Amino acid sequence: ETATTLVTLERTEARLAELKARVAAHADDLHVGGEIGASSAANWLAHATRTTRSAAHGTVRLGHALEEHRPTRDALAQGQILTDQARAIIRAIDKLPDTIPADLVAKAEQHLLEAAKQYDAKALTRLGKHLYEVIAPEDADAHEATILEREEAAAAKTCHLTMHDDGHGKTRGTFTLPTYHGAAL
């Protein structure tokens, strides 16, 4: 009975999170809090509920994102997926190129919603990185190469090596380098 109750509570919490996000997005559209000088509905929500600003902004962002991702919104509203799973699905779908036809985007979202029945948000994030292979396998290699080039360029920009002599015959340092080079090291 306790196990069933915990699962039921998780699903109920997901349904409430969807409703809260939807109302928060609506509040943002209405500029709730503006009449008392709040710079945004999210800032007003944070102040009114004593939640952190980042949590309030996250709720508003989720509400707006769910407006664009109706199947994910419906699954969350029915308690079929959890809030962190919904966020992972939305991030993966939003990373798809704009050139992908709407029917393939819908197929991708449905694929991740099906996967959410078996996987948590962390696994969905990993699956989302390979989503292009599911919806457009013939173009996947070129797309993956483009992503890899972007990731490598970003990693190269953040590379650094700092060393200093400690004065006792040793040199200490820190470094940041691409994962590939780190594996070789």
Image (cartoon, grey):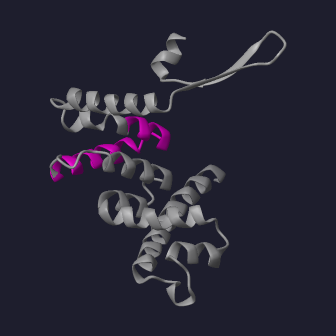
Q: Is residue 142 left or right of residue 53?
A: left
* Residue 8 in sight in this render: yes
Q: Nearer the viewer, residue 38 or 54?
A: 38
**Residue 169 percent coordinates (x, y):** 81, 9
State whether residue 34 is above or below residue 181: below
Task: In the rendered view, tell whether residue 27 sits above or below residue 55.
Answer: below
Q: Is residue 118 visible to the viewer in this orientation of the structure? A: no
Name which residue lies at 24% across and 45% down.
Answer: 97
Q: Is residue 105 magenta?
A: yes
Give the quarter of the image for residue 45: bottom right
Q: Position of residue 133 (x, y in %)?
A: 25, 32
The region drawn magenta spans 102-127
Is 125 left or right of 168, judged from the image as shown? left
| Image quadrant where one finds the C terminus | top right
Q: Residue at x 57, y 61 (%)?
A: 54
Residue 80: % across, % down: 42, 55
Q: Looking at the image, which is closer to me, 180 or 74?
A: 180
> Mostly what secondary structure, the magenta segment?
helix
Residue drawn at point x = 15 percent, y = 29 percent: 138
Outermost residue toward the right in this view = 168
Outermost bottom residue: 35
Height in image: 112 above or below 82?
A: above
Task: Judge whether residue 73 is colored magenta.
Answer: no
Q: Who's the residue at 21% across and 49% down the image?
A: 98
| Picture mark count | 0
The quarter holding residue 46 reads bottom right
Residue 112 percent location from the top left of the image: 34, 44
